[in-house]
Image (cartoon, rainbow, N blue to C red):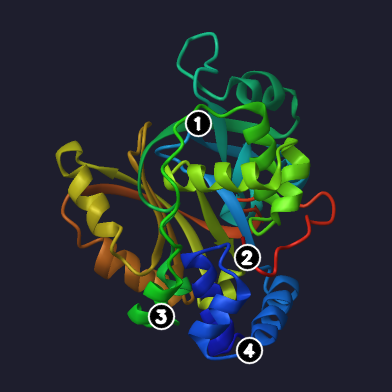
Amino acid sequence: MLDELDRAVIHALHIDGRAPFSRIADVCGVSTQTVARRYRRLRTQAGLRVVGVLDRDTGPETHWTVRLTCTPAATQALAHSLAARPDTSWVKLTSGGTEIFAIVHVPDGAGGTDGAGAPHAMLLHDVPRRAGITAVSAHCLLHTYLGGPTAWRGITRALTPEQEERLRPPASAAADPRPLTAADRALLDVLRHDGRAAHTDLAAATGWSQATAARRLAGLRASGTLFFDVEVDSTLLGGTAQTLIWMSVDPGRLDDVATALAGHDELAVVAATTGPTNLLAQALCDGPADLHRYLTRELGALDGVRTMETAPVLRTLKRAGAVRASPPARTAGRGA
Protein backbone atom coordinates (compact mmCIF):
# COMPACT_ATOMS: atom_id res chain seq x y z
CA MET A 1 0.00 0.00 0.00
CA LEU A 2 1.07 3.59 -0.61
CA ASP A 3 1.88 5.87 2.32
CA GLU A 4 1.42 9.63 2.49
CA LEU A 5 4.84 10.42 1.00
CA ASP A 6 4.21 8.06 -1.92
CA ARG A 7 0.93 9.82 -2.61
CA ALA A 8 2.58 13.23 -2.27
CA VAL A 9 5.26 12.33 -4.84
CA ILE A 10 2.58 11.12 -7.29
CA HIS A 11 0.53 14.28 -6.70
CA ALA A 12 3.61 16.46 -7.22
CA LEU A 13 4.41 14.78 -10.53
CA HIS A 14 0.82 15.31 -11.65
CA ILE A 15 1.30 19.05 -11.11
CA ASP A 16 4.66 19.11 -12.92
CA GLY A 17 5.88 15.88 -14.42
CA ARG A 18 9.37 17.32 -14.88
CA ALA A 19 9.69 18.94 -11.45
CA PRO A 20 13.20 18.46 -10.01
CA PHE A 21 13.37 16.00 -7.14
CA SER A 22 14.89 18.80 -5.06
CA ARG A 23 11.74 20.95 -5.45
CA ILE A 24 9.45 18.04 -4.59
CA ALA A 25 11.63 17.26 -1.56
CA ASP A 26 11.51 20.87 -0.36
CA VAL A 27 7.71 20.97 -0.59
CA CYS A 28 7.31 17.60 1.14
CA GLY A 29 9.86 18.34 3.86
CA VAL A 30 12.20 15.42 3.11
CA SER A 31 15.58 15.00 1.46
CA THR A 32 16.15 14.89 -2.29
CA GLN A 33 17.59 11.38 -1.91
CA THR A 34 14.40 10.23 -0.19
CA VAL A 35 12.23 11.50 -3.06
CA ALA A 36 14.54 9.85 -5.61
CA ARG A 37 14.32 6.52 -3.77
CA ARG A 38 10.52 6.73 -3.55
CA TYR A 39 10.29 7.58 -7.25
CA ARG A 40 12.40 4.56 -8.21
CA ARG A 41 10.38 2.27 -5.92
CA LEU A 42 7.06 3.55 -7.27
CA ARG A 43 8.26 2.96 -10.83
CA THR A 44 9.11 -0.64 -9.96
CA GLN A 45 6.21 -1.54 -7.67
CA ALA A 46 3.32 0.76 -8.65
CA GLY A 47 3.88 1.20 -12.39
CA LEU A 48 4.60 4.92 -11.94
CA ARG A 49 5.66 6.68 -15.12
CA VAL A 50 5.58 10.27 -16.36
CA VAL A 51 4.82 10.48 -20.09
CA GLY A 52 4.52 13.32 -22.58
CA VAL A 53 1.16 13.44 -24.37
CA LEU A 54 -0.31 15.61 -27.14
CA ASP A 55 -3.39 17.43 -25.86
CA ARG A 56 -6.61 16.02 -27.34
CA ASP A 57 -8.28 19.34 -27.94
CA THR A 58 -5.34 21.54 -28.97
CA GLY A 59 -2.88 19.02 -30.43
CA PRO A 60 -2.55 18.32 -34.18
CA GLU A 61 -4.48 15.03 -34.09
CA THR A 62 -8.04 13.74 -34.20
CA HIS A 63 -8.91 11.02 -31.70
CA TRP A 64 -11.24 8.10 -32.23
CA THR A 65 -12.62 5.54 -29.79
CA VAL A 66 -12.57 2.02 -31.20
CA ARG A 67 -14.49 -0.95 -29.79
CA LEU A 68 -13.75 -4.44 -31.06
CA THR A 69 -15.90 -7.39 -30.01
CA CYS A 70 -13.90 -10.62 -30.29
CA THR A 71 -14.02 -14.30 -29.59
CA PRO A 72 -12.23 -15.08 -26.30
CA ALA A 73 -9.44 -16.91 -28.14
CA ALA A 74 -8.57 -13.85 -30.25
CA THR A 75 -8.81 -11.10 -27.66
CA GLN A 76 -5.42 -11.26 -25.94
CA ALA A 77 -3.28 -11.38 -29.08
CA LEU A 78 -5.22 -8.59 -30.78
CA ALA A 79 -5.13 -6.36 -27.71
CA HIS A 80 -1.36 -6.71 -27.39
CA SER A 81 -1.00 -5.99 -31.11
CA LEU A 82 -3.03 -2.79 -30.76
CA ALA A 83 -1.05 -1.72 -27.70
CA ALA A 84 2.21 -2.01 -29.67
CA ARG A 85 1.01 0.43 -32.33
CA PRO A 86 2.35 4.00 -32.09
CA ASP A 87 -1.07 5.46 -32.99
CA THR A 88 -3.02 3.99 -30.04
CA SER A 89 -3.49 4.72 -26.36
CA TRP A 90 -5.69 3.47 -23.49
CA VAL A 91 -5.96 -0.08 -24.80
CA LYS A 92 -8.23 -2.00 -22.42
CA LEU A 93 -9.82 -5.43 -22.15
CA THR A 94 -13.44 -4.98 -21.08
CA SER A 95 -16.67 -6.93 -20.61
CA GLY A 96 -15.05 -10.04 -19.19
CA GLY A 97 -12.34 -10.08 -21.86
CA THR A 98 -14.60 -10.29 -24.92
CA GLU A 99 -14.21 -6.65 -25.97
CA ILE A 100 -11.25 -4.36 -26.63
CA PHE A 101 -11.41 -0.60 -26.19
CA ALA A 102 -8.73 1.70 -27.60
CA ILE A 103 -8.18 5.29 -28.65
CA VAL A 104 -6.67 5.79 -32.10
CA HIS A 105 -4.78 8.99 -32.97
CA VAL A 106 -5.05 10.27 -36.55
CA PRO A 107 -2.89 13.24 -37.66
CA ASP A 108 -4.97 16.17 -38.88
CA GLY A 109 -5.30 16.09 -42.66
CA ALA A 110 -4.74 12.34 -42.82
CA GLY A 111 -8.33 11.50 -43.67
CA GLY A 112 -9.32 8.40 -45.55
CA THR A 113 -11.08 8.03 -48.85
CA ASP A 114 -14.30 9.56 -47.57
CA GLY A 115 -12.45 12.64 -46.28
CA ALA A 116 -13.82 12.13 -42.77
CA GLY A 117 -10.45 11.47 -41.15
CA ALA A 118 -11.49 8.09 -39.75
CA PRO A 119 -8.71 5.71 -38.61
CA HIS A 120 -8.80 3.89 -41.94
CA ALA A 121 -5.36 2.31 -41.73
CA MET A 122 -6.61 0.26 -38.81
CA LEU A 123 -10.32 -0.20 -39.56
CA LEU A 124 -10.25 -0.77 -43.30
CA HIS A 125 -6.99 -2.66 -43.67
CA ASP A 126 -5.54 -4.15 -40.50
CA VAL A 127 -8.62 -5.15 -38.50
CA PRO A 128 -10.55 -7.10 -41.16
CA ARG A 129 -7.56 -9.40 -41.59
CA ARG A 130 -7.83 -10.51 -37.98
CA ALA A 131 -9.73 -13.73 -37.29
CA GLY A 132 -12.08 -13.76 -34.32
CA ILE A 133 -13.40 -10.18 -34.61
CA THR A 134 -17.20 -10.18 -34.60
CA ALA A 135 -17.97 -6.43 -34.45
CA VAL A 136 -16.15 -3.12 -34.95
CA SER A 137 -17.28 0.41 -34.12
CA ALA A 138 -15.44 3.73 -34.14
CA HIS A 139 -16.55 7.18 -33.00
CA CYS A 140 -14.77 10.52 -32.98
CA LEU A 141 -13.90 12.28 -29.72
CA LEU A 142 -15.34 15.78 -30.10
CA HIS A 143 -14.51 17.48 -26.81
CA THR A 144 -12.81 16.50 -23.55
CA TYR A 145 -14.46 17.78 -20.37
CA LEU A 146 -12.26 15.77 -18.01
CA GLY A 147 -9.01 14.02 -18.91
CA GLY A 148 -5.79 15.12 -20.53
CA PRO A 149 -4.11 17.75 -18.32
CA THR A 150 -6.78 17.16 -15.66
CA ALA A 151 -7.01 13.82 -13.89
CA TRP A 152 -8.86 11.49 -11.59
CA ARG A 153 -8.94 13.16 -8.21
CA GLY A 154 -7.70 10.00 -6.52
CA ILE A 155 -4.23 11.16 -7.60
CA THR A 156 -4.54 14.70 -6.24
CA ARG A 157 -5.49 14.39 -2.58
CA ALA A 158 -2.10 14.38 -0.87
CA LEU A 159 -0.90 18.00 -1.03
CA THR A 160 -2.36 21.24 0.30
CA PRO A 161 -3.26 24.11 -2.06
CA GLU A 162 -0.18 25.99 -0.83
CA GLN A 163 2.05 23.02 -1.63
CA GLU A 164 0.42 22.69 -5.06
CA GLU A 165 1.17 26.34 -5.81
CA ARG A 166 4.84 25.92 -4.89
CA LEU A 167 5.09 23.00 -7.33
CA ARG A 168 3.47 24.64 -10.33
CA PRO A 169 5.90 24.98 -13.24
CA PRO A 170 7.53 28.40 -13.49
CA ALA A 171 6.27 30.69 -16.22
CA SER A 172 7.78 29.44 -19.46
CA ALA A 173 8.75 31.10 -22.68
CA ALA A 174 6.09 32.26 -25.10
CA ALA A 175 4.09 29.56 -26.84
CA ASP A 176 5.63 28.23 -30.03
CA PRO A 177 2.77 27.77 -32.56
CA ARG A 178 4.87 26.22 -35.36
CA PRO A 179 3.49 23.01 -36.91
CA LEU A 180 5.13 19.83 -35.69
CA THR A 181 8.21 18.77 -37.65
CA ALA A 182 9.93 15.40 -37.95
CA ALA A 183 12.36 16.50 -35.22
CA ASP A 184 9.43 17.50 -32.98
CA ARG A 185 7.92 14.05 -33.43
CA ALA A 186 11.25 12.45 -32.54
CA LEU A 187 11.26 14.54 -29.35
CA LEU A 188 7.69 13.52 -28.59
CA ASP A 189 8.52 9.86 -29.16
CA VAL A 190 11.18 10.00 -26.43
CA LEU A 191 8.76 11.76 -24.07
CA ARG A 192 6.02 9.20 -24.73
CA HIS A 193 8.37 6.63 -23.19
CA ASP A 194 9.79 8.82 -20.41
CA GLY A 195 8.45 12.31 -19.76
CA ARG A 196 11.42 13.02 -17.49
CA ALA A 197 14.02 12.17 -20.13
CA ALA A 198 17.07 14.43 -19.84
CA HIS A 199 17.79 17.20 -22.35
CA THR A 200 20.77 15.18 -23.54
CA ASP A 201 18.39 12.38 -24.61
CA LEU A 202 16.07 14.86 -26.35
CA ALA A 203 19.00 16.45 -28.16
CA ALA A 204 20.31 13.08 -29.30
CA ALA A 205 16.90 12.08 -30.68
CA THR A 206 16.30 15.35 -32.55
CA GLY A 207 19.79 16.36 -33.66
CA TRP A 208 19.31 19.68 -31.87
CA SER A 209 21.50 21.19 -29.20
CA GLN A 210 20.35 20.73 -25.61
CA ALA A 211 19.39 24.42 -25.44
CA THR A 212 17.26 24.16 -28.59
CA ALA A 213 15.56 21.01 -27.31
CA ALA A 214 14.79 22.73 -24.00
CA ARG A 215 13.34 25.82 -25.75
CA ARG A 216 11.16 23.76 -28.07
CA LEU A 217 9.92 21.64 -25.16
CA ALA A 218 9.03 24.80 -23.22
CA GLY A 219 7.22 26.24 -26.25
CA LEU A 220 5.14 23.09 -26.78
CA ARG A 221 4.14 23.11 -23.11
CA ALA A 222 3.30 26.83 -23.16
CA SER A 223 1.07 26.41 -26.22
CA GLY A 224 -0.86 23.58 -24.58
CA THR A 225 0.13 21.19 -27.37
CA LEU A 226 2.07 18.97 -24.95
CA PHE A 227 1.34 18.04 -21.36
CA PHE A 228 2.72 15.46 -18.95
CA ASP A 229 0.54 12.67 -17.63
CA VAL A 230 1.20 10.40 -14.66
CA GLU A 231 0.61 6.68 -15.09
CA VAL A 232 0.18 4.64 -11.92
CA ASP A 233 -1.70 1.54 -10.79
CA SER A 234 -5.05 3.07 -9.79
CA THR A 235 -5.95 0.13 -7.56
CA LEU A 236 -3.28 1.32 -5.10
CA LEU A 237 -5.16 4.63 -4.84
CA GLY A 238 -8.63 3.16 -4.29
CA GLY A 239 -9.78 2.71 -7.90
CA THR A 240 -10.32 -1.05 -7.75
CA ALA A 241 -13.49 -1.07 -9.90
CA GLN A 242 -12.68 0.58 -13.24
CA THR A 243 -15.59 0.95 -15.67
CA LEU A 244 -16.24 2.58 -19.03
CA ILE A 245 -19.66 4.23 -19.31
CA TRP A 246 -21.38 5.16 -22.57
CA MET A 247 -24.35 7.52 -22.22
CA SER A 248 -27.00 8.90 -24.53
CA VAL A 249 -27.79 12.43 -23.36
CA ASP A 250 -30.39 14.88 -24.66
CA PRO A 251 -28.44 17.18 -27.05
CA GLY A 252 -29.71 20.31 -25.32
CA ARG A 253 -28.47 18.97 -21.98
CA LEU A 254 -25.16 17.49 -23.15
CA ASP A 255 -22.93 20.38 -22.07
CA ASP A 256 -24.62 20.73 -18.66
CA VAL A 257 -24.49 16.99 -17.95
CA ALA A 258 -20.85 16.66 -19.08
CA THR A 259 -19.80 19.69 -17.03
CA ALA A 260 -21.51 18.25 -13.95
CA LEU A 261 -19.86 14.86 -14.47
CA ALA A 262 -16.44 16.51 -14.78
CA GLY A 263 -16.83 17.57 -11.15
CA HIS A 264 -17.43 14.04 -9.86
CA ASP A 265 -14.56 12.57 -7.86
CA GLU A 266 -15.23 9.07 -9.22
CA LEU A 267 -14.51 9.97 -12.85
CA ALA A 268 -11.17 10.18 -14.67
CA VAL A 269 -12.49 10.92 -18.17
CA VAL A 270 -15.57 12.68 -19.55
CA ALA A 271 -15.71 13.25 -23.32
CA ALA A 272 -18.34 14.03 -25.96
CA THR A 273 -18.34 11.66 -28.94
CA THR A 274 -20.10 10.96 -32.19
CA GLY A 275 -22.24 7.83 -32.54
CA PRO A 276 -25.43 6.36 -31.05
CA THR A 277 -24.21 7.48 -27.62
CA ASN A 278 -22.79 10.97 -27.26
CA LEU A 279 -20.95 10.94 -23.92
CA LEU A 280 -18.16 8.65 -22.68
CA ALA A 281 -16.88 8.47 -19.11
CA GLN A 282 -14.42 6.35 -17.16
CA ALA A 283 -15.21 5.65 -13.51
CA LEU A 284 -12.79 4.51 -10.81
CA CYS A 285 -14.62 3.30 -7.72
CA ASP A 286 -13.76 1.38 -4.57
CA GLY A 287 -15.41 -1.90 -5.52
CA PRO A 288 -18.73 -2.97 -7.10
CA ALA A 289 -20.89 -1.63 -4.28
CA ASP A 290 -19.31 1.83 -4.60
CA LEU A 291 -19.80 1.70 -8.38
CA HIS A 292 -23.48 0.80 -7.92
CA ARG A 293 -23.93 3.69 -5.50
CA TYR A 294 -22.33 6.09 -7.98
CA LEU A 295 -24.36 4.90 -10.97
CA THR A 296 -27.71 4.99 -9.18
CA ARG A 297 -27.41 7.92 -6.79
CA GLU A 298 -25.15 10.37 -8.63
CA LEU A 299 -24.98 9.68 -12.34
CA GLY A 300 -28.54 8.34 -12.52
CA ALA A 301 -29.88 11.44 -10.78
CA LEU A 302 -28.75 13.78 -13.57
CA ASP A 303 -31.53 15.14 -15.74
CA GLY A 304 -31.04 14.45 -19.44
CA VAL A 305 -29.33 11.03 -19.35
CA ARG A 306 -31.59 8.78 -21.44
CA THR A 307 -29.62 5.53 -21.63
CA MET A 308 -26.42 4.17 -20.13
CA GLU A 309 -24.15 1.22 -20.95
CA THR A 310 -21.35 0.07 -18.64
CA ALA A 311 -18.33 -2.11 -19.44
CA PRO A 312 -16.08 -3.18 -16.54
CA VAL A 313 -12.37 -2.98 -17.37
CA LEU A 314 -10.63 -6.29 -16.85
CA ARG A 315 -7.12 -5.11 -17.69
CA THR A 316 -5.33 -2.05 -19.08
CA LEU A 317 -2.57 -3.01 -21.51
CA LYS A 318 -1.59 0.52 -22.47
CA ARG A 319 -2.22 3.92 -20.94
CA ALA A 320 -1.26 7.34 -22.35
CA GLY A 321 2.40 6.60 -23.03
CA ALA A 322 4.12 4.24 -25.42
CA VAL A 323 4.48 0.58 -24.49
CA ARG A 324 7.99 -0.13 -23.35
CA ALA A 325 9.74 -2.17 -26.01
CA SER A 326 13.20 -1.46 -24.62
CA PRO A 327 14.74 0.06 -21.47
CA PRO A 328 13.46 3.61 -20.96
CA ALA A 329 15.60 6.65 -21.66
CA ARG A 330 17.84 7.91 -18.87
CA THR A 331 15.73 9.78 -16.35
CA ALA A 332 16.58 13.33 -15.37
CA GLY A 333 16.64 13.14 -11.60
CA ARG A 334 17.29 16.87 -11.43
CA GLY A 335 14.21 17.60 -13.50
CA ALA A 336 14.52 19.74 -16.59
Q: Position of residue 37 (x, y in %)?
A: 72, 82
Instruction: Specify whether 73 is left or right of 53.
Output: right
Report which residue position mark 2 lands on.
Answer: 335
Name the residue tied to disc 3.
Answer: 163
Could you give the CA–CA distance between mark 3 and mark 2, rounded to whole angstroms?
Answer: 18 Å
Label 1 neighbour load within 10 Å: few <14, some 14-19, many 20+: some
In terms of sequence position, does the residue under pointer 1 or pointer 2 come before the other? 1
Going from N to C along the chain, the mark reached first, 3 or 2, is: 3
The quadrant where residue 272 appears: top left
Tell me the quadrant of the picture where the C terminus can be found: bottom right
Q: Is residue 93 visible?
A: yes
The circle on residue 31 is 4
User: Which labelled disc corresponds to residue 61?
Assistant: 1
Query: Where is 244 relative to 79, above or below?
Result: below
Sequence-earlier tag: 3 or 4 = 4
The answer to which of marks 4 and 1 sits earlier in the sequence is 4
C-alpha separation, residue under disc 1 versus residue under disc 3: 34 Å
